[in-house]
Image: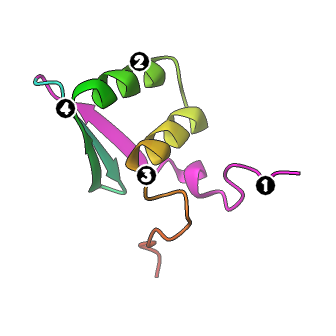
Amino acid sequence: MSKPVDARGVLDDAPFTFTASGDGKVFIRWKGRQAAVLQGERAKQFLTRIQGADGKAAQLLMAKATGNFKRGNEKSNRK
C-alpha cells in the first residue's frame, strides 16, 4: 500500500503560488520565496496542466514542478 501524497498536510495551507510572465516564463514561489523558474516547453506543459486544477491539485502540481519538495526536506518558517 502506498503512502498518501500529502501525509503531513503541508499543502493544506496553500504555500505555493505562481506567476506567468509575458515572455513565456513561469515563476513558482513557496511561502513568498522563489522556488523555481520554468521556461520553454516545461512552462507550457505546466500552464496546460494547472489550468483545470484547483486547490490541493494545483498545489501538488506546483510542488512537483519545483522538484525539491518531494523528499520532505523543505524548511518551514514556523517558530
Which is more N-terminal, label 2 or label 4? 4
Where does label 2 land, which residue? Answer: 48
First along the sequence among labels 2 and 1: 1
Q: Residue 57: percent from the left, percent from the top?
A: 58, 34
Give the residue at mark 4: 25
| Among the two numbered marks 4 and 3 on one chain, the one whose residue lies closer to the N terminus | 4
Q: Which mark is residue 67?
A: 3
Bounds of the magenta span?
A: 1-22
| Amino acid type indicated by mark 1 | Lys
Question: Which residue appears at 76% of the width and 51% of the height?
Answer: 4
User: Does residue 26 appear to the left or right of 48 in the view shown?
Assistant: left
Residue name at image x 54 percent, y 57 percent: 70
Mark 1 residue crowding within 10 angstroms, few (<14) / some (14–19) / many (20+):
few
Q: Secondary structure at mark 4?
A: loop
Spatial separation of the CA atoms under disc 3 and disc 2: 18 Å
Badge nearest the viewer, 4 or 3: 3
Nearer the observer: mark 3 or 2; the answer is: 3
List the residue tagged with mark 1.
Answer: 3
Image quarter for residue 22?
Answer: top left
Q: Secondary structure at mark 1?
A: loop
Q: Amino acid at mark 2?
A: Thr
Q: Horizontally, is 79 left or right of 12 in the view?
A: left
Q: Check disc 4 and give the amino acid type.
A: Lys
Alpha carbon of mark 1 to alpha carbon of mark 4: how far? 33 Å
Say whether disc 3 or disc 1 marks the residue closer to the N-terminus. 1
Q: Is residue 10 left or right of residue 68?
A: right
